[in-house]
Amino acid sequence: MPSVVGLLEQHELAARRRVDGLREEADRIQAELAAAEQEWQEWAIARRRVGTVLAPDGGNTADEKTVRGPRDADAHSVSGQAAKPKSQVPVWREGLAWSVLSVDYQRILEALADRHRLHQGPLTCQELAVMFGLDAVPAKVEALRSKAKRLVARGWLAQRQPGQFALAQGPAGQGGAS
């Protein structure tokens, strides 16, 4: 007949094995859950982007009639200077209205124009994210940084110090009313 201590050791060993097995299963499920959440977020982003593209107005708030200035007559003939909906940021030129940009780009310009009017310094993308009511998480900040750098490359913004953005001299001289 087995001893009481021996029976207790057997039960303890069985319980320990069960706990170890459940921990391994929990770790596997946790990893699977993280992968599934990542996939879900990617699909949600894709659905929002497709929804924007397929919106009745094509996701574009720009209206060709809002392009004002001396080049209005040839604005329709020069395809590289007008933005396609949500796809391009045209190179800044005198008389080009902010309305040729998508709403996201316009929001960035408006925030920096307000700073310029108040004689305040440039903003970082984290500060822009907070101003726009976004969580200052890397994904949101990097999305803003990408847009800001595109605006810098096209002459709408200036980046005098890495990571700090301000209106470029040309758009600032027009006060955003173009």
Image (cartoon, rainbow, N blue to C red):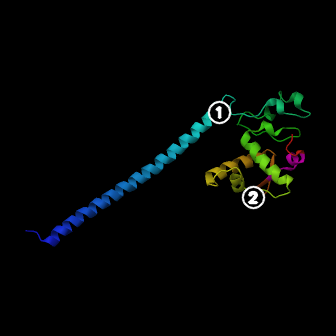
Horizontal relation, residue 134 to residue 43: left or right: right
The residue at which mark 2 appears reads as: 162
Q: Which mark is residue 121?
A: none
Horizontal relation, residue 54 to residue 104: left or right: left
Asked if residue 147 lies in the magenta stretch, the reply is no
Say what secondary structure mark 2 lies in. Answer: loop
Q: Does residue 120 sit above or below 95 in this rendering? A: below
Image quadrant of residue 45?
top right
Q: Nearer the viewer's eye, disc 2 or disc 1?
A: 1
The residue at which mark 1 appears reads as: 53
Horizontal relation, residue 144 to residue 42: left or right: right
Horizontal relation, residue 12 to residue 44: left or right: left
Camera-side residue of 147 and 153: 147
Q: Residue at x 62, y 51 (%)?
A: 139
Few, some or many residues within 10 Å of mark 2 (<14, 14–19, 20+) = few
Q: Label 1 is placed on what type of residue?
A: Val
Question: Along the polypeptide, which appears first: circle 2 or circle 1?
Answer: 1
Say what secondary structure mark 1 lies in. Answer: helix
Main SS of the magenta part reads: helix
Image quadrant of residue 115?
bottom right
Asked if residue 169 lies in the magenta stretch, the reply is yes
**Which quadrant, please, contains the C terminus?**
top right
Q: Residue at x 81, y 35 (%)?
A: 81
Q: Which residues are magenta?
A: 166-173
Q: Does residue 108 sit above or below 74 in this rendering? A: below
Camera-side residue of 67 and 75: 67
Q: Residue at x 76, y 40 (%)?
A: 89
Q: Label 2 is placed on what type of residue?
A: Pro
Camera-side residue of 178 and 28: 178
Residue 159 image position (x, y, % from top left)? 79, 54
